[in-house]
Image: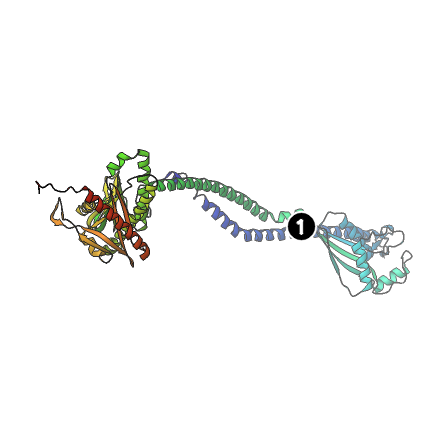
Amino acid sequence: MSETESSIEPGTYRRVWPAVVAVILLLVALPVAVLFDLRALTEELSRRQANDISKIINDIRGFYATEVVGRIQQAGDTKVTLTDNFRHVPGAIPIPATFSLEIGKLTSLRDNTVRYDFVSDYPFAGRQPHVLDPFQKQALADFRKDPSIQTLETVEGGWSPTVRVSAPILMTEPCVACHNTHPASPKHDWKVGDVRGIQSVSVTQPLTLGSLGFRYIFVYFGVAVATGIAFIVLQWRQSRQLATINNELKDANNFLATVSLKIAKYLSPEIYKSVFSGERDVKVTAERKKLTIFFSDIVDFTATTERMQPEELTALLNEYLTEMSRIAQAHGATIDKFIGDAILAFFGDPTTLGAREDARACLRMAVAMQERLRQLQVKWRNQGIEQPFRVRMGINTGFCNVGNFGSEDRMDYTIIGAEANLAARFQSVAPAGGIVMSYETLAHVKDMVDARPIEQISMKGISRSIVPYLVEHTCIGDEKTTVINEHDEGLSLMLDISGMDAARASRLRGKLQAALAALDDKIKDQIVPASPERA
């Protein structure tokens, strides 16, 4: 396990499941908590109202027992009378209106949620007037304006709302007869149906009572808040761990990217891609494939090193190898290795287009290298290098063992076989600036080159004689190219007639003819006539 993977706590993912289960349980528990709270609230309200009604009934029963039944019993044989001033008249009991007033006084003395009021704006003389609130005043005005109204309702208060229901007190015939003849009556012209006052019932729901009814909801939200806080803390910890892991991965990726870029400098691009993409296993193994092998070497490199300073030689060689590698990569070659100033490359692994197309791609690469080298030679001469690099090239097509060779700890991707050695041998017999190939390679590219056989060669391990073929002209695409490249003491010649027009060709022909005439004169001057004795 890598260091990044081991930095993740084992219980990180296990702690996620309790949070998920808790969220699901909370979602399921919400309607259950609401149902329980509604049931509890209904039960609490009913219990409170039942208690209040029981108190009111007890008060009414007590008043009735004391002020009605008790007074009748005290009267004995005395005639019982009905009067509003019943407490001052022996044997008298209250009339209905007075009875209602007394009930209102009894309910107002208790701190009940239910209250009964019996009030009027026409009190009897000598009695304390009723203090009417705005609702009662408005209700009286509305009832008298429209006697058909049965009840009026209103809700007052904020956090502890009070529901008030009022009904009119209508004058009946006994009421009219009593009030119109009573000396203390404030009015003596009452009629049946007149609104004498109002009676109202008020029910108050205290906030504390409603809050207690929602205890399950409060518990639910408490658990939900605790779960949410725990989940947030868990997410925060996980986000910190993920941020740490991401930073570690970023550093690891940057390190791997840097390392891979460095490794890429030591591997062929094709091998690098196949290894890092997972297409090729990094293990000691090889297979036999038909390849086209390319081998190039700089002519007289040892002598060149003696004429140049090490720093200048290093810069020149690196420039040469860089340019050749770029061309090889552009044509799809796999660069096996650099052997000092020599280059070993091949076509056919890890990717191949077939033996024919691999050979043709190799030829195109060799021609492109020679053309680029001629451009570099001009540049190097302008830099003061008297004898710039000249390169020989050899190409061969045949079967080789290709793959990873070495040990399990260290290996090298390369090719081995007589065909690879033969490509190196072709390079050794090629002239400076020339390309020599085998007959099998020539068979694949014969429509692209004009080649002639040169002196046969023999190799150790190969019993037959081998005929190399020297490329004289190339025809890449529709254009045929003839290149003459020769360097010797007193001679530096590079001639490329591809793309040359007639006028320029004629001018160069004149210069070459003049050079030939000068060479002829030089030869004639150095010929000594034979003496008569020797003749």
Residues 484 and 288: in front is 484
Residue 205 at what x, y percent from top left? 69, 51
At mark 1, the secondary structure is: helix
Residue 187 at what x, y percent from top left? 89, 59
Residue 410 at what x, y percent from top left? 26, 38
Residues 484 and 425: in front is 484
The colour scheme used to paint the residues is: rainbow
Q: Is residue 240 above or below residue 44?
A: above
Mark 1 Cα-neighbour bin, 10 Å: few <14, some 14–19, many ≥20: some
In the rendered image, the residue lying farthest to the right is 183
Quadrant in the picture for the C terminus: top left
Q: Is residue 534 left or right of residue 489?
A: left
Residue 253 at what x, y percent from top left? 40, 42
What kind of residue is marked 1? Arg
Query: According to the image, label 1 marks what residue?
Result: 48
Residues 58 and 185: in front is 185
Q: Residue at x 63, y 53 (%)?
A: 42
Res 189 → quadrant = bottom right
Residues 398 and 136: in front is 398
Res 295 → quadrant = top left
